[in-house]
Image (cartoon, rainbow, N blue to C red):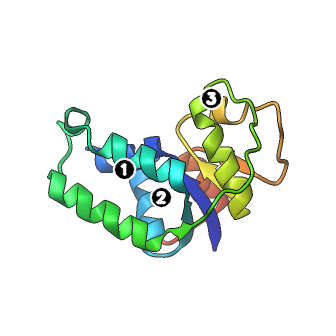
Amino acid sequence: MAVVVLDTNVLVAALLRGGGSARRVLRACLLEAYRPVLGPALLAECEDVLARSELFADSVLTAKERGDLFDGFLHRCRWVELFYAWRPNLPDEADNHLIELAVAAQADAIVTRNVRDVARGELKFPSLKVLTPEQCLEVFPCPP
């Protein structure tokens, strides 16, 4: 089972109308085809973004349904404490926590819509893949 860090932008895309491959990745996490990991910074970011009602104006889910789905996702996540900050120096400083979490969790991949920036850190981890949801589904096939 692939261990993945699911970036907040993938979670948001999965909850919007036409979630496509992001929704399939989230479903794979809920069905335990992938093992998502979560740490303090990513949890705080997810909670902050999911609380923005204007972002989900086009969502087919109510706020309660989104909350219930997120709770289900949290129950599938493995909690990872971070004890060392790697500081990979990504173009967006706010994304560094994704690499740090992935390294601490020994994750197979970070799944993000922001591959270009997340993969451009000065500090490289050759065994860590940075994938779009579509690439994730190709590299780590799971039931539809």
Q: How many marks?
A: 3
Q: Is residue 119 visible?
A: yes
Q: Residue furthest top?
A: 91
User: On the image, numbered disc 3 is attached to which residue?
Assistant: 93
Residue 65 rendering spot, x and y as whole percentages:
19, 60
Residue 9 rendering spot, x and y as whole percentages:
45, 41
Q: Residues within 10 Å of mark 3 (few under 14, many from 20)?
A: few
Q: Is residue 144 visible?
A: no
Q: Report helix, strand or loop for mark 3.
A: helix
- The kind of residue tagged 3 is Glu
Mark nearer the N terminus (2 vs 3): 2
Q: Quadrant of the C terminus?
A: bottom left
The numbered disc on residue 14 is 1
User: On the image, numbered disc 2 is attached to which residue?
Assistant: 25
Residue 60 rendering spot, x and y as whole percentages:
17, 49
Give me the residue at 30% from left, 49% from top: 15
